[in-house]
Amino acid sequence: MSKTKFYLAALILVTGISSFGASIDHIQNYTPEYGANPAQQGAINRNTSVYFNPAGLMRLEDGTYLRAGIQYAYGKETMTYKGKEYSADLGAPVPNLALYTKNKERTWFWTFGGLGGGGDLKYDDGVAGIGVLEDVINMDLGIAKVRAKDLGSSAEGSNMYIQSTLGRAWDINDKVSVSLAGRVVRGSRLLKGHLNAELNATVFGKENSLPIEAEIDSERTAWGFGGQFGLNYAATERLNIGMRYDTTVRMNFKADADEKKASLLGKELGFSDFFPEYADGRKVRRDLPALLALGASYKMTDSWTTFVGGNYYFNESAKIDKKANPNHDIEYDNGWEVSLGSEYWLNKKWAWMIGANYSDTGAHKDTFSDVEYALDSFMAGTGVKYRPDESMEWIVSYNHYWYDSAKGNFTEKYPGKALENQNYKKKISSVGLGFTKKI
């Protein structure tokens, strides 16, 4: 890479994209109840089985059910370089809707809502790539001094996937039931960046200034299709085991972009030279990986049920922007998460829920950049259920994610420079409200 291109590379790393949850793109917090108790893989209930254990719908009472809910995620994502903090606030609504009808022979079910990504992030004061610019460019060559100055760069990014799933469940016998469904997914990844900087060179006491300005407004969109298979085993009257497999959803994103490049020493360079997947007309695969979910619920008493569950993400077999960028090839390991939960009915109308989740995303520091950083996390949540009558339930939930902080790779990526590795942090919470009505 030429020095000119290297300098601009440091300048234009100025965007952030959020993922609300515990994986890279694929999220599992579909419903408000998950926020209170994330171990839903083996649950049998009218609020969450349609999402997390659809084969278990055959264990519900006959009838038609409508459920709806919304979660609001909020928090902050932060990059730090040499003590300076670059941060963006997150605020994102996550709606969900489901309709299902069950009789003795079969259950038909439909769900709609978020499947991946998170909300919009805007870094008003640039990001860590702007901070490293000074150390990369600022040089004292004896007869010449070169200095860089940011004049007000900003960036904005978002990452959202919406799904609609239609399927059917049926009994194999009085203990085993299965489900089969098809899914359509719409993905959108937005990048807006504005670079406003200046290079100042002092030679023999004479100052010269070179303005550098670049912009991009790019949206990558794709449609994808996948399948879902579920299995439920009602081992005893108290113990239930659920399994679900979601296939890989192939997503071939195409970018639609307006871009203004910077003219620097006779070269036209811009955001798309370093994030080519956002160049106008560029097509790049970024799949949602396959997922295996397994869990169990056990009724300790008639009032108290405990839950355990886990998810495994097959990231390595999915194409996630692989070979999209020759300067930053992305390779993820497989990811996993485990959850525990509890639900206790205080009386016939009120129940208290609590749960926790730990996630290893499969992302390592070579995948981190100012574009995205999927950090491992621990989540704890709680909430209440209110059942005014036998036909309706309301849920209110709250959870908080504690993300591990992680170092980037500035020193490894650009050896021989007086740099430090950037540090990435997140803190995200959500509140949820939902209801289920038997109609």
Image (cartoon, helix red, strand yellow):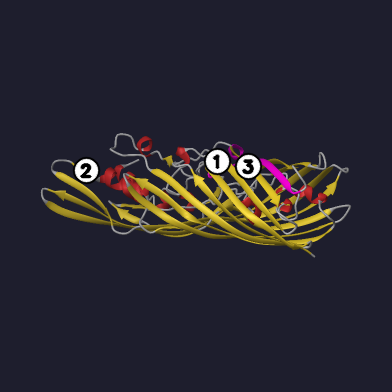
Q: Looking at the picture, how far across and down is residue 416, in whole percent? A: 30, 34
Which badge, 1 or 2, is on the more N-terminal residue? 2
Mark 2 residue crowding within 10 angstroms, few (<14) / some (14–19) / many (20+): some
Furthest-left residue in this view: 204
- Say if 327 sits above or below 353 in the image: above
Mark 3 residue crowding within 10 angstroms, few (<14) / some (14–19) / many (20+): many
Residue 314 lies in the magenta stretch: yes
**Callout 3: SS:** strand
**Residue beneath label 2, please?**
139
Judged left or right of residue 170, residue 9 is left
Range shown magenta: 303-321
Q: The N terminus is located in which quarter?
A: top left
Which residue is found at the position 40% from the left and 38% from the top?
409
Report the amino acid beneath label 2: Met
108 or 343, which lies in front?
Answer: 343
132 or 192, which lies in front?
Answer: 132
Residue 260 visible, this orientation = no
Q: What label does residue 361 carry, if any?
A: 1
Report the amino acid beneath label 1: Thr
Judged left or right of residue 110, residue 61 is right
Which residue is found at the position 27% from the left and 43% from the top?
135
**Callout 1: SS:** loop
Report the amino acid beneath label 3: Ser
Which badge, 2 or 3, is on the more N-terminal residue? 2
Which badge, 1 or 3, is on the more N-terminal residue? 3
